[in-house]
Image (cartoon, rainbow, N blue to C red):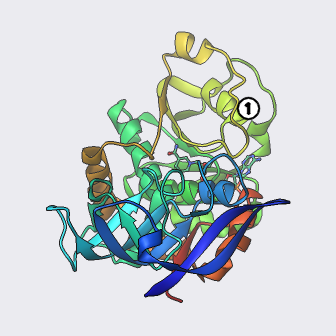
Amino acid sequence: MTFKALVTAKTAEGVSTTLTDRELADIGEGDVTVAVEYSTVNYKDGLALSGGRIMQSMPMIGGIDLAGTVEASDNPAFKAGDKVILNGWGLSQTHNGGYAQKARVPGDWLIPLPRKFSTREAMAVGTAGYTAMLCVMALEHNGLTPARGDVLVTGANGGVGSIAISLLSQLGYRVIASTGRAAETDYLKSLGAAEIIDRATLSAPGKPIAGEKWAGAVDSVGSHTLANVLAQTKYRGVVAACGLAQGLDLPGSVAPFILRNVTLAGIDSVNTPREVRLEAWARLARDLDPGKLKSTVTEIGLADVPGVAAKILKGEVRGRTVVNVNA
Ligand code: NDP
């Protein structure tokens, strides 16, 4: 029996992604077969489908996230009918991903769908939202509380940014949103941002140390933006760095660390240990306002993925994109 899959392959011009029919025997190793219901489009999916160095071999089915129902399992932790989610690990890197109606994956990569979420809502969260939660947990782990002062979120309209704003405001923080899209002010305020700043104030080369503005920050942008965020962070503040939308470089100095005792916490969602994933998803179930999550979501079908993947690299996608693989 065949099913639909979106396959990215090398061509003479570069790479191309096409909707094809696949058979279960073709989709790779694993001890659990999942009937996929939803996937998502993250920035990393944009990179993968553009031929950026994400997929370690091709042809490959992209999609770093999936949620669905176990169809068959040789893994004692899962049985047919279980609802599951998968974020990261080898998906779309070394293993076929979520842009297909079926996936065959190692059960160790799966976690049970928290009861609070449907598979669609879990993918509205997706890697971007689960990464936002990892950032919030890192801020807390390093001592941040709402009483310490404002928290900055960069890349505010993006997936990580939108969900970080929702989570932080729900937890009682006063959130400052940095964006290049002032036209989305109402959206950002509806998520819980108290103040909006123009990202241009952070994106150019700045001083090694500057006036103290925020007690904490979630940065999905990197480069000069992260260097300036660090330079403007208050004494004993903490910054969680997860992204590179502006660039992979970090052209700053050690001044914020040695003069202001600032902590820079790195965030990786791909190889996060299982127990931390379970904690992050339990916290998402507790702390994410479902109404705000809903307002971030756009739903598309498999055939629409290449177009949205190209747009996300240009910073033109707002919030989260959910892929209904059966649409
Ligand atoms: P999105 O594209 O949804 O969001 C990125 C946002 O960054 C954009 O919406 C835009 O926000 C802003 N932005 C885009 N280009 C620039 C630029 N040149 N300069 C400054 N700001 C810019 O992506 P995601 O939210 O999915 O991911 C965000 C980042 O986090 C990516 O770099 C991604 O690779 C990384 N990431 C890392 C993870 C990890 O495990 N470490 C996991 C998930 C994501 P606005 O229009 O509001 O300015």
Q: Residue at x 47, y 38 (%)?
A: 267
Q: According to the image, label 1 marks what residue?
A: 224
Q: Amino acid at mark 1?
A: His
Q: Residue at x 39, y 71 (%)?
A: 67
CA neighbours of label 1 inside 10 A, class few (<14), some (14 to 19), many (20+): many
* Quadrant, the C terminus: bottom right
In this picture, residue 191 sits left or right of residue 130: right
What is the quadrant of residue 60 in the picture?
A: bottom right
Rendering coords of residue 283 (x, y %): 29, 55
In this picture, residue 259 sits left or right of residue 66: right
Residue 257, above or below 197: above
Depth check: 40 or 290 in front? 40
Residue 156, above or below 185: above
Residue 59, above or below 243: below
Depth check: 143 or 320 in front? 320
In this picture, residue 73 sits left or right of residue 264: left
Q: Residue furthest front?
A: 25
Q: Residue at x 65, y 51 (%)?
A: 155
Rendering coords of residue 221 (x, y %): 66, 43
